Image (cartoon, grey):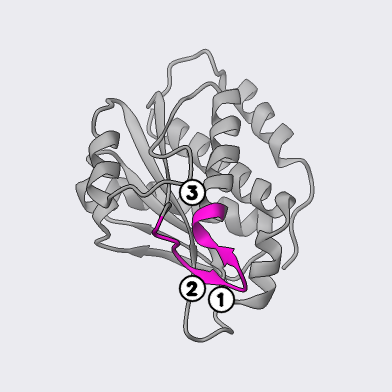
Amino acid sequence: MQLNRSSLFYALLFAASFFGVNSAHAFKTVIIDPGHGGRDLGASDSYVYEKHINLDVSRRLERALQEAGFKTVMTRTRDEFLALSERSSKANRYRNAVFVSVHFNSAYRTAALGIETFYRTSDGEKFARLVQNELIKNIGATDRGIKTANFSVLRHTKHPSILVEGGFISNKGERSAMLDPQYRQVVADSIARGILQYNRKTF
């Protein structure tokens, strides 16, 4: 897997400056949902737990979006269990927002690899495509595409919503990449760039 090691963070800031972080946003708030947590480990392999990777990437995403002028809301900020209904309920308290659930994948077939992004509505499809394109362009991972899904957090959240699967913990190569802070930063910055693009396209 070849990461685009150019500074995505500074590119993100340039994009925010170009678009004008002080100008009106199509949406003002991004709700970031680090999947799993607490007793819900998510995917795991070789003592690597999805819940920890999700939270780290989400924190990095939060910082990038705040630098770009957005208000951010995290459904969880520490290693705690949160029911799916609580995640959607928290998201729905906010107006003029979008929702991103951050996950990493697993499969019985350890050769499975790549990144995919899920959506449920037509607004979510546009959102998913922009985020997926940035992830694939900047990470160089196998493109598993965008897909419809009836996941609870997508079904019950009223905002444009996506769920990102940033690679397979069950795949040795991708699991190794996830342990690199630079990889996690590129995942976060890529999601942020997709959010910026979606914001401008929906204004």
Inspect the magenta stretch and tell me whether residue 47 lies in it: yes
Q: Identity of the amino acid at label 3?
A: Leu
CA separation, marks 2 and 3?
23 Å
Residue at x-position 53% and y-position 43% = 58
**Residue 121 in sight here:** no
Query: Looking at this view, is 108 or 131 the one in front?
Result: 108
Residue 88's x, y, as percent?
Answer: 26, 43
Which residue is identified by label 2? Answer: 106
The quarter of the image holding the C terminus is top left
Residue wearing tag 1: 170
Residue 20 seen in the figure: yes
Element on which disc 2 rests = loop
- What's the residue type where badge 2 is placed? Ser
Mark 1 vs mark 2, CA separation in Å = 5 Å
The image shows residue 121 at horizontal and vertical percentages of: 26, 51
Q: Which residues are magenta?
A: 39-52
Query: Does residue 141 appear left or right of residue 94 in this picture?
Result: right
* Relative image position of residue 202 (x, y in whole percent): 38, 33
Query: Which one is earlier in the sequence, the residue at label 2 or at label 3?
Result: 2
Q: Nearer the viewer, mark 2 or mark 3?
A: 2
| Residue bearing mark 3 | 130
Q: Amino acid at mark 1?
A: Ser
